[in-house]
Amino acid sequence: MRKTDFLLEIYKKKQTVFTLSEIALLFPQISYQNLKRKIFYYVKKGKILKLRKGIYGKEDFNPLELANKIYTPSYISFETVLKKEGIIFQETSIIFAASYLTRRIECAGVKIFYRKIRDEILINPKGIEKEENYFLASKERAFLDTVFVYKNYYFDNLSPLNWEKVFELLKIYKNKALEKRVNQYFKIYKEENA
């Protein structure tokens, strides 16, 4: 395999962030040690970025994809989705994700805040959308994640939410206190839109 073929194969993929294991699957004919040497060579030449130990990316890597790769399973949620959907208005450069642990990290200039969600909620696919190369909570799932983690959160605009979906997704949390808080937010929404 020519050197240019290696880079070409990686850059042909829509994916912008790769784990060492994913690169190994792309090139099963290359031994693990040779693969590590090739990657090291391209990192040194500036053709591939080393984002974190065992995680590499293209120059124009997607930060949401990176956040999803560092800790797996995880999905983009909370303020990142709520801001995008117009439910909160506060600007933030931090990417918020649901995961099996709570961590604040900075990687390749990207600030990421992982919030712990119970395993049975985290691995439930309802309300999680597969984007090009990462997982993203729907606005309803992000709303519920936020209300689940924070006992008293201020939302600027509840009207983008589909409340039927909110109450359907609420079942996966199996939490009476959460149900009560969601009903209070629904009451506020109805009063504001009466």
Image (cartoon, grey):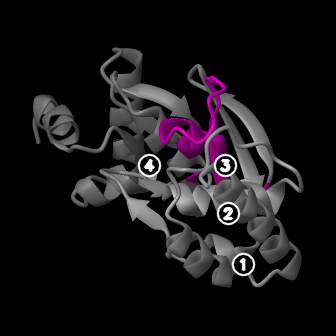
Which residue is painted at 44% across and 48% down in the image?
Answer: 20
Q: Position of residue 82 (x, y in %)?
A: 58, 44
- State the residue in front, 67 or 163: 163
In three-dimensional space, the C-alpha distance between marks 3 and 1, rounded to whole angstroms, equals 26 Å
Q: Which residues are magenta?
A: 76-101
- Residue 70 visible at all: yes
Whichever of labels 2 and 3 marks the residue nearer the N terminus, that label is 2
Is 155 magenta? The answer is no
Residue nearest the viewer, comparing 18 with 14: 14
Q: Which residue is mark 2?
A: 144
Q: Is residue 125 left or right of residue 29?
A: right
Give the residue pinned by disc 1: 173
Q: Amino acid at mark 1?
A: Tyr
Amino acid type shown at disc 3: Glu
Q: Residues within 10 Å of mark 4 (few under 14, many from 20)?
A: some
* Residue 192 circle label: 3
- Mark 4 residue element: helix
- Viewer-side label of 4, 2: 2
The label shown at residue 119 is none
Q: Which residue is mark 4?
A: 20
Mark found first going from the N terminus, 4 or 2: 4
Q: Upstream in the sequence, badge 3 or badge 1? A: 1
Give the distance between the C-alpha atoms of the residues marked 3 and 4, in whole angstroms: 50 Å
Q: Position of residue 21 (x, y in %)?
A: 42, 56
Q: Is the Cβ of the residue at disc 3 closer than 8 Å to that at disc 1?
A: no
Q: Height in image: 189 above or below 90?
A: below
Q: Is residue 100 magenta?
A: yes
